[in-house]
Image (tube, rainbow, N blue to C red):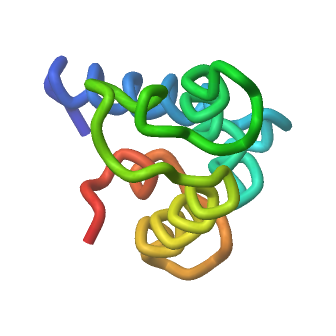
Amino acid sequence: MLLMPSILLAQNSRSEYLQLFDSNGDGRVSEAEYVAYMSRGFHSMDSNGDGILETDELPGGRGRPITLTDFQNNLRRQFHKLDRNRDGYLDARELTAPPG
């Protein structure tokens, strides 16, 4: 089967993106790996380290405060929406698919 260069690029990009999340290198992303990787943004915005993004820590200084727990619970819901085959892991295709 001959693949078009753009298809190869998309497959490589998916694989590279998966590697960002895949901390144990098993070629798939667990819920814990997904939550840990996606929580990095929260931690970088939480300037005082109190586990709450206050309004002044949010982009644009707008919005309601959110706790790390609430943020991570939302990430877990997103993970399960992405896990279309319900095996408890995300492969590269699931990870890069739009949420459904």
Image position of 91 (left or right of 29): left
* Residue in the picture at 71% in, 23% down: 48
The reply to whether residue 28 is visible in this rendering is: no
Can you give x and y, in whole percent of width and height, for residue 52 in the image? 64, 44
Can you give x and y, in whole percent of width and height, for residue 31 in the image? 69, 60
Tell me if residue 36 comes above or below residue 80 in the rendering.
Answer: above
Image position of 94 (left or right of 88): left
Tell me if residue 94 comes above or below residue 87 in the rendering.
Answer: above
Q: Quadrant of the C terminus?
A: bottom left
Q: Quadrant of the N terminus?
A: top left
Can you give x and y, in whole percent of width and height, for residue 10 in the image? 27, 29
Can you give x and y, in whole percent of width and height, for residue 21 in the image? 64, 35
The reply to whether residue 27 is visible in this rendering is: yes
Image position of 24 (left or right of 35): right
* Residue in the picture at 61% in, 67% down: 73
* Residue in the picture at 54% in, 59% down: 75
Viewer-side residue, 58 vs 96? 58
Image mark count: 0
* Residue in the picture at 35% in, 32% down: 11
Q: Residue furthest right?
A: 24
Q: Residue furthest bottom?
A: 86
Tell me if residue 82 comes above or below residue 59 in the rendering.
Answer: below
Viewer-side residue, 14 vs 56? 56
Could you say which quadrant of the image residue 13 lies in? top left
